[in-house]
Image: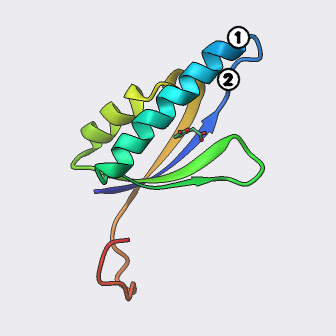
Amino acid sequence: MLFHVRMNVNLPMTMPAEQAAQLKADEKALAARLQHEGKWRHLWRIAGQYANISVFDVASVDELHTLLTSLPLFPYMQIQVMPLCRHPSSVRDNDL
Ligand SMILES: O=C(O)CC1=CCC(=O)O1
């Protein structure tokens, strides 16, 4: 199942720089693993914003929820999820 996900990141201004750097490093490491596993199919920065557009390929809504809530930055993100299905006019023979 494919999901389009928008993540807006809002780190508190009061967070110590070292804590923010550690959270970002942990997030990057997990994101790399999930991309290599094929679960995090796309990761794009939204230009000019501390936000990203991602596409996840997971088996279920429950798996997506578990994955998103396990992200180190999850407590500091506002997340919007849109489930995707195939468009009948798509000329692609694969899903992405
Ligand atoms: O910077 C972001 O948009 C949040 C994020 C997702 C994966 C990552 O490494 O950072």
Dot 2 crowding, Cα within 10 Å, few <14, some 14–19, many 20+: some
On the image, the x and y values in percent for residue 23 come to 55, 22
Q: What SS does tag 1 mark?
A: loop
Residue 88 badge? none
- Residue in front for this viewpoint, 79 or 40: 40
Quadrant location of the N terminus in the rendered image: bottom left
Residue shown at 48% from the left, 27% from the top? 26
Counting residues from the start of the chain, the first of labels 2 and 1 encountered is: 2
Q: Amino acid at mark 2?
A: Leu
Image position of 62 (left or right of 77)? left
On the image, the x and y values in percent for residue 18 come to 65, 14
Q: Which image quadrant for residue 19?
A: top right
On the image, the x and y values in percent for residue 66 come to 31, 31
Residue shown at 47% from the left, 24% from the top? 72
Marks 2/1: CA–CA distance: 10 Å
Give the residue pinned by disc 1: 16
Image position of 38 (left or right of 42)? left
Q: Is mark 2 within 8 Å of ligand 1?
A: no
Residue shown at 49% from the left, 31% from the top? 27
